Amino acid sequence: MKIHRVQELGLRGAKDWEIFQEAQRRQVVLVTNDRGFRDVPLYPLSSHHGIIVLKMKPDPERVKAVHRVLRRLLEEEEKIEGCLFVVAGNKYRKRLQP
């Protein structure tokens, strides 16, 4: 699995919509801590390859906990495309198109 950081793509400071469009152009899952990507009317579930929003505070222990849950999500979930996941320190929630 290849991971690209926004900075490496030359998108530092870009608007959320530009980042979203680039993720779709590349056909990749968008992993972010920007809670704005949870806005389903703005980013409809059927319009993307998956969005994972990480709820983290700048605390090393909290970051480790969120990363553990993220790993579990990636192991457990068979379908990420078209789904929105919100990952917290002890669980994750999944929204999919009804």
Image (cartoon, helix red, strand yellow):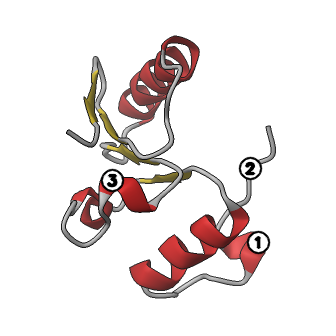
Residue beneath label 1, please? 8
Residue beneath label 3, please? 45
Element carrying mark 3: helix
Q: Earlier in the sequence, mark 3 or mark 2?
A: 2
Nearest to the eye among marks 2 and 1: give it.
Answer: 2
Residue beneath label 2, please? 3
Q: Earlier in the sequence, mark 3 or mark 1?
A: 1
Element carrying mark 1: helix
Image quarter of residue 10: bottom right
Residue at (49%, 72%) from the top-left corner? Answer: 20
* On screen, residue 71 above or below 82: above
* On screen, residue 68 above or below 49: above
| Mark 3 to mark 1 CA distance (whole Å) | 26 Å
| Mark 2 to mark 1 CA distance (whole Å) | 10 Å
Nearest to the eye among marks 3 and 1: give it.
Answer: 3
How many discs appear?
Answer: 3
Q: Earlier in the sequence, mark 2 or mark 1?
A: 2
Residue 77 spot, x, y in % from top left:
48, 19
Question: For the residue marked with disc 2, what is the amino acid?
Answer: Ile
Residue 57 spot, x, y in % from top left:
31, 45
Question: For the residue marked with disc 1, what is the amino acid?
Answer: Glu
For the C terminus, the image quarter is: top left
Image quarter of residue 71: top right
For the N terminus, the image quarter is: top right
Badge 2 crowding class, 10 Å Cα cut-off, few under 14, some 14 to 19, many 20 or more, is few
